[in-house]
Amino acid sequence: MALMTEIRAQHELRPYKKIRGKILQTNTTKAKLKAGETVLGCFIRYPSPGITEFVAWQGWDFLVFDAEHGTISPDQCESMVRAAELRGVTPLARATTNQAQ
């Protein structure tokens, strides 16, 4: 029972804050780094929100979507970001190029 409580606590949605009248999720990874804590993350190369959500349940602080070396399109990346945020994990995206298209 204690294990389930701990798992639920880890996967609570991130706290929200209001900035300039807009409600935003708190970047918990950034907050942990500022506090001198260690953060752990995982790279995802496959364009699947389902895989993203599953990996997010594993307790990572952040997920990196590798569009530079993977096959992730901008549309797929958007869905993956939503899946990560749904589980309270900070999403990071690696772009294929730094040029506007």
Image (cartoon, grey):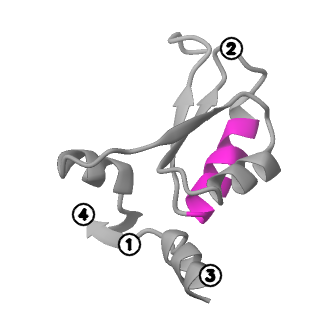
Task: Report whether residue 101 is seen.
Answer: yes
**N-term mark: 1 or 4:** 1
Residue drawn at the location 54% of the way across and 15% of the way down: 100
Residue 95 found in image quarter: top right
Residue drawn at the location 66% of the way across and 22% of the way down: 67
Disc 3: which residue = 4
**N-term mark: 2 or 3:** 3
Residue 60, position as x, y percentages in the image = 53, 50
Q: Residues within 10 Å of mark 3 (few under 14, many from 20)?
A: few
- Observer-side mark, 3 or 4, equals 3
Rounded to the nearest angstrom, the CA distance separating label 1 from label 4 is 17 Å
Residue type at mark 4 is Arg
Mark number displayed over residue 69? 2
| Nearer to us in this view, 4 or 88 | 4
Q: Residues within 10 Å of mark 2 (few under 14, many from 20)?
A: few
Q: Residues within 10 Å of mark 1 (few under 14, many from 20)?
A: few
Relative placement, left or right, of 44 versus 24 is right
Name the main secondary structure of what is drawn in magenta: helix
Residue type at mark 1 is Pro
**N-term mark: 1 or 3:** 3
Residue 86, position as x, y percentages in the image = 61, 64
**N-term mark: 4 or 2:** 4
- Where 49 sits versus 20, above or below? above
Rounded to the nearest angstrom, the CA distance separating label 3 from label 4 is 37 Å
| Nearer to us in this view, 74 or 28 | 28
Rounded to the nearest angstrom, the CA distance separating label 1 from label 3 is 21 Å
Disc 1: which residue = 15
**N-term mark: 2 or 1:** 1
Residue 57, position as x, y percentages in the image = 65, 60
Disc 4: which residue = 20
Task: Report whether residue 21 is seen.
Answer: no
